[in-house]
Image (cartoon, helix red, strand yellow):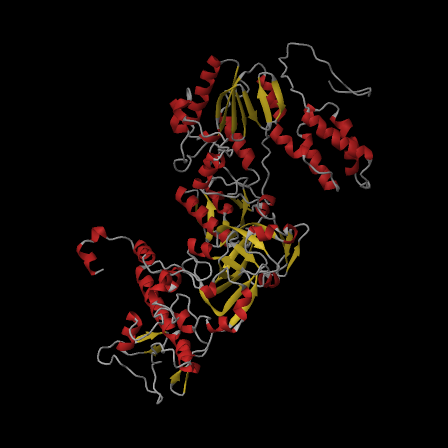
Amino acid sequence: MSLLKFAPHVAISDEAQADQFINGLNPDVFTLVNTGRPNTFADALNRAKGAEAGLLRQRRAQFVPAATKAAENPQIPPPPRFDAGSSSSGKKKNFFKGKGKQFKRSGTSSSFSPSDFKQMQTGQQAGDYCTKCGGRHATEQCRGVSGLCRICNQPRHFARICPQRNAGNFQNSAAARTMPTPERQASSVYSYQPQNPQQSRQGGSQTVSQPPKQQAKVFALTEEQAQAVPDEVIAGNCYLCNFPAYVLIDTGASHTFISENFVVSHKLSAEPLTEIVSVSSPLGKGMLSITAVRNCMLQFEDHAIEIDCVVLGLFDFYCIVGIDMLTKYRATVDCFQKVVRFKPENADEWKFYGKGSRARIPLIYAITMNNLLQKGAEGFLIYAIDTKKSSPNLVDIPVVSEFADVFPDEIPGLPPYREVDFSIELLPGTQPISKAPYRMAPIELKELKDQLEDLLTKGYIRPSVSPWGAPVLFVRKKYGSMRLCIDYRQLNKATVKNKYPLPRIDDLFDQLQGSTVYSKIDLRSGYHQLRVRDEDIPKTVFRTRYGHYEFVVMPFGLTNAPTVFMSLMNRVFQRYLDDFVIVFIDDILIYSKNLNDHTSHLRTVLQTLRDEKLYAKLSKCEFWLQRVVFLGHIISGAGISVDPSKIEAVINWPRPKSVPEIRSFMGLAGYYRRFIQDFSSIAKPITQLTQKNAPFVWTEACEISFLELKKRLTTAPVLTIPLGTGGFVVYCDASHQGLV
């Protein structure tokens, strides 16, 4: 270490140095130091020294039983005996006096003679007794030298804590004699500390008390054990300490356990247990645990609980939630429906829906596979590809490649002041409205902090001292990411509504007659490309745990945002509307009758966006298409049809059980009513249930109507866009008056 100052260029990081040091330790010391792997070399060195000293004391203590046997049988020569470190008078002996050598650990000290130390290393005057374990065999024949377990023949653990050992053996006296002593545990990074150290010294001599042992049990350690009774266990994917984890809900487990591999791989901090936990399973498996991870945050979708976990060598589950935590949070387990209902004190009830055990895929080694293939076994090569369309390459798209500045990865700075700015007009007499922030889970707070930093960096928000304030919350997107939403409901109630009309979708599609080539452009964060009027910026304030912030650009969630942005887009493309451009808020559709016209139309639109400093998102844009999806419809030269992906929700809709559910279904199905002839007549039995004071009775006619609407949507025709040159047939009712 001292030579590094002469060659600093060859120095490695402290963490890498610690890893190299730990990997070079002997198996016994490695096992003790690697539990809760230290991050610094100094910490690793100190723990290794303590572990080595503890192992030395344990080996020395193991000579005492052998010496007792030798005393009972004079024919057996006694093994070397080491002084406990104290005389009968209570004064400690120091055989290394003058040399300053005395072993100390955890507030206690012990010493022995140099000759004894030499005997233990060389085996001199020890007869046939092993200097490694005290057994009657040569030292070189001892299994302890190789570091292998005497039961499973595996390294890095002793027989007394072997997972293959029968759990019942931990209860007999022999196991009690081999239970790790406080000195042995002191050598580990997670040591046992006596509750009263003074009790270990009585009458001037040191006495060692065995640490207390607690019996625990677990229902299943592996997925095979869980799958043996699939109806009695609940498992699912959660977040443990902000890391994805596969969790088992086990009412048969007395404690909550966490995988040792999970602790090491994610560098979680473990603490020593006050009691040794002996864990047994119904299959006779037994394990010991000496550490625990406290205050782990277990995230179930939108709710989180704080749990304490005992570290255990789990194989398939990252965490097993036992009866201790289920009791703490007043959980009720429904094994039939695989639902766990949590009802914490002073909190609302929430549910966790388990997925049962995962299908386990057996794995084999490559050598085994080759041997099987050579013997005539059949093999199938399966590979997966990503079917999602990747982002188009800008340089390969005709015309579009000339406007690379219109498709940036990020919007360059704040938008300019435009002809239309976003304003918030309040009802007369409105006072500033401020709401307290909503409570968030730790994982949401981390996401909030990241998104706030991103918005501040872009300049979209700034700190505020305004008396206004709206709370924020997160909504999960389709692929798992979280969207920051601001609850502007109270502000929207006090806002004068903008009456600027949004275009009817039917009117937009009527302009597409004769078109065969299409391009679609989607603006990048369209709302953020419009400034808020300076005097209205304080009204956009939102409150978080990390402070108050106000928007400089138009935020999402305000009542007049769609109409104001629609007004801006109509002003920008006023000359081209209903000629070759359709605009609906931030979606732009360019349509042409042939390729030559489309080249000119596309270049005109992109040049307009460049002039107005409006930017698009290339990954959401499509160019030079003969068939395009726009506003929930499929548009082509043949006409307009229903988008199958959009009506999937209608097809899978369960039978309504209340009036609000009927209104929801009819609102969704009614969006495509133009594709269903006699829609009103078919839906009449259902719509009658929504009338005032009408009893909700689901009759056979309602069921027929419900199923017929679903059938008509799946077989909806393609509507041809009329050119206006042919004849029309008008269908009307039987009234004497009507409008044509």
Of 195 and 330, nearer the camera is: 195
Q: Residue furthest top?
A: 726
Q: Quadrant of the N terminus?
A: bottom left
Q: Quadrant of the C terminus?
A: top right
Residue 553, image x and y in percent?
46, 40
Residue at image coords 38%, 24%: 395
Of 677 and 8, nearer the camera is: 8
Residue 313, image x and y in percent?
48, 58
Residue 686, image x and y in percent?
77, 34
Compared across the picture, whether 322 is left or right of 406 comes to right
- The answer to which image quadrant residue 636 occupies is top right
Q: Residue furthest left?
A: 6
Residue 558 in the image: above or below residue 303: above
The reply to whether residue 643 is visible in this rendering is yes
- The answer to which image quadrant residue 403 occupies is top left
Of 740 and 517, nearer the camera is: 517
Of 603 and 382, nearer the camera is: 382
Q: Residue furthest bottom?
A: 89
Residue 23, image x and y in percent?
34, 56
Residue 380 in the image: above or below residue 580: below
